Amino acid sequence: MLKSIIFLIVSILLLLMPVSQSEANSLTPVPVYGYRVVNTYPHDPESFTQGLFFEDGALYEGTGLNGRSSLRKVKLQTGAVVKVHKLTREFFGEGITVVGNKIIQLTWKSRIGFVYDKDSFNLLRTFKYPTEGWGITYNGKYLILSDGTANLYFLEPETFREVRRVEVRDINGPVSRINEMEYIRGEIYANIWLTDRIAKINPGTGRVNGWIDLKGLSPFSGRDENIKVLNGIAYDEKNDRLFVTGKLWPYVYEIKLVQPR
C-alpha cells in the first residue's frame, strides 16, 4: 500500500514539473505546406525516376529497374532525352547528385556507386558503400546519402568516407523510407517512399522542420499508386524554381509552396 502511495505522489510531481525549452520545442508540431502548380512539363512515362537535379537549364535524371537503369540529361521544356548512359543489367540505378563537374550515381543493393564526367557522361570511377543506396544530395561540403532507414550518412565527396550520420525524426519519432533528396537553401528536401509527402529536414539535427503535402498531384490512382509513386526533387537555385515528379509519371511539375494557415 505504501509503495502505491509513493508511486502516485512521484507520478503527480513529475507531471507538475516544468518542461524545458528544448523539450517543449521537440513536442511542437511542424508546419505542413500545401502547393500550387506553376508549370507542367513533359516527362518520359517509361522513366522509373530515382534521382533528379537541375543545372545549366537542364534536368539530369537517374532511372531504375534492372535492364532499364540509366543516367540522362533531359530538356525541361520538351522532356527530350539529349544524352544517356545505360547501366548494365546487374545494376538497379538509384539517386544522383552533382559535385562540380562530376555526377554521382548510386545503385540499390549492389552497394556500388558511379562517378561520371558531367559533360560527357564518361565513367571516371566506381566506389563502394556499406548500405543500400536510395537517395543522394550534396550540401557544398559533404555528400548526404539515404538508405531507406531513418538515417542520413554524410560522406566526404572524394574518398566517400563517412564522417557522421544523423537520425531523422519528427514529433512521432524516427522517419524512415527516406528516398530521393535535394539540398535546398540549408535544408534537405526528401521524398518519403510510398507517401505524397516531402520532408524538410534540418541537416544538423535530423529534425523535420516541416512537411510538404502533395496529395492530389499524382496523375495515378488505385494499384498504380504503389509503383508510380512520387519521387524526384530538383531545384533551380538561380530562378528559385522547385520541380517534382514521380516514377513513370508523364509530367514534371514546377510548384510553389503554399504557406500553412
Image: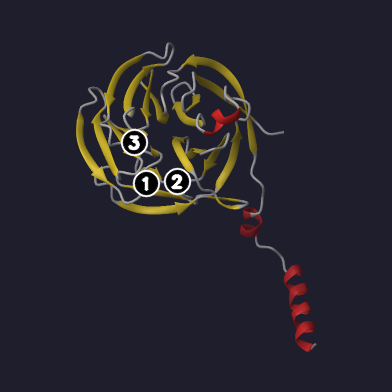
Q: How many marks?
A: 3
Q: Amino acid at mark 2?
A: Gly
Mark 1 and mark 2 lie on one chain; the one further toward the N terminus is: 1
Split into 4 quadrants, where in the image is the C terminus? top right
Q: Position of residue 116 (x, y in %)?
A: 24, 31
- How far separated are the C-alphas under marks 1 and 3? 11 Å
Q: Tell me where residue 140 sits by quadrant.
A: top left
Answer above or below: position of 54 versus 188. above
- Residue found 35% across the figure and 50% down from its top: 131
Q: Position of residue 30 (x, y in %)?
A: 64, 44
Q: Which residue is mark 1?
A: 132
Q: Position of residue 84 (x, y in %)?
A: 29, 21
The answer to whether 251 appears left or right of 66 in the picture is: right
* Secondary structure of residue under mark 1: loop
Q: Which residue is mark 2?
A: 148
Q: Which residue is mark 3?
A: 92
Q: Amino acid at mark 1?
A: Glu
The answer to whether 172 appears left or right of 243 in the picture is: right
Q: Tell me where residue 200 sits by quadrant.
A: top right
Asked if labels 2 and 1 touch by Cβ distance under 8 angstroms, the answer is yes
The answer to whether 30 appears left or right of 107 in the picture is: right
Asked if labels 3 and 1 touch by Cβ distance under 8 angstroms, the answer is no
Furthest residue in direction bottom, as rendered:
2
